[in-house]
Amino acid sequence: MTITNHATRVADSFHDNHSAVSGRQIQEILDKAVAGHRLTVDEGALLFNCKDIHALGRAADAVCRRLHPEPYRTFNIDRNINYTNVCAAVCDFCAFYRKSADADAYVLSREELYKKIEETIALGGEQILLQGGNHPSLKLEWYEDLLRDLKAKFPKVNLHAFSASEVWHFHKINKLPVEVVLRRLRDAGMGSLPGGGAEILTDRVRRAMTKNKVMTEEWLEVHRVWHKMGGKSTCTMMFGHIETIAERVEHLERLRQLQDETGGFTAFICWTFQPENTAMSDVPPAGSYEYLKTQAIARLYLDNVPSVQSSWVTQGPKIGQLGLMFGANDMGSLMIEENVVSSAGTVYHLSLEQIKQSIRDVGFIPRQRNFFYELIDGPAA
């Protein structure tokens, strides 16, 4: 497509020839973004040649403060419940999925789900991130029953449920239009749509790393339909594997275009690929420098996405905190439970007080919010 070819030419021209991009050129691009003007695909690609991580951070922080001049930074309390680990897709980057016949394959019972949600509520949580694999045999009615049951038992809990990959899978195995699937899920109690499963939104990358999984246009279409129904969702990017710099920029451009069209994304979250225990374990892990750089550029590029979440779950508490100075206005979730990333060896955990202190230590007031970025605590958090 045009975006890919154009961004690739820019990246090929400049990324391997750092002398071709002057510090003055980079500063002009940063100044443009800080002033509130939209960056082009070319400029987004050129920013990845910036070697001054502090300049990128200052610019991303300036944009963040323009969009969020309030004296607080936010977090939420939720739990990522993986209701099943059975998945018909094969993703080389995933250490979590199992096939139906595997000894450790599971589908959680309702009693197990109830217990996990009750524990979340007891800790002040008001949201459940409900995700699994693309289960080959569970029909749409099973998911509707699950949502109705959970919503009846926990009416105040937002069910942030099912990735675009799962929704597209429901559409295929039930032979129903995506809009019908989403309406039925919404009517059963689904409150918002997670941004998981995006990885890198280019088909070259997706074909190389996955089989039987949603492709770029399909991922975007699920979110497009959900937004046009009045729903809200997040958008994500997992980077640092086989993608090129041009493909990172294409990913951001595709998200920005859809946000122009629908306005349905509440936040952007990015994290680095965790290679341990995966079929791609030979890929060198991207470090915190690359993470902060990419998050900062995303804040500069995604001028129409209101919020950026810091990814302390993969980066650790100090880099997660530093993310609040590199374009993020949100510390993400307390994440009472997380299974997918931790299956690849990432084991960072923070207490609620540690999250609050991380926000205080960079000069902001910590405030709890819900998925829709509505504050749900008192002013003296």
Image: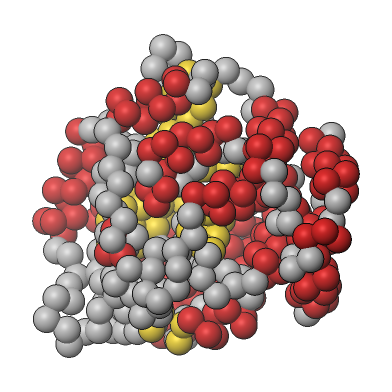
Residue 79 location (% of width, % of height): 30, 47
Note whether 376 is above or below 125 in the view shown: above
Residue 255, image x and y in percent? 67, 60
Query: Residue shown at 23%/33% (left/top)?
Result: 123
Q: Tell me what residue is drawn at x 51 percent, y 70 percent.
A: 241
Judging depth in this view, the residue of 152 and 200 nearest the camera is 200
Residue sitting farthest toward the front: 19
Q: In the image, is 77 to the left or to the right of 290?
A: left
The percent coordinates of residue 287 (x first, y second) are: 48, 55
| Quarter location, residue 254 | bottom right
In the rendered view of the protein, which quadrant contains the C terminus? top left
Residue visible at 48% across and 18% down?
Answer: 365
Q: Quadrant of the N terminus?
A: bottom right
User: Is residue 52 something that shows in the picture?
Assistant: yes
User: 108 or 242, which lies in front?
Assistant: 242
Q: Would you say 235 lies left or right of 83 here? A: right
Can residue 233 be seen at all in this image of the molecule?
no
Q: Nearer the viewer, residue 78 or 276?
A: 276
**Which quadrant of the figure has residue 361?**
top left
Name the residue rendered at 62%, 49% in the picture: 293
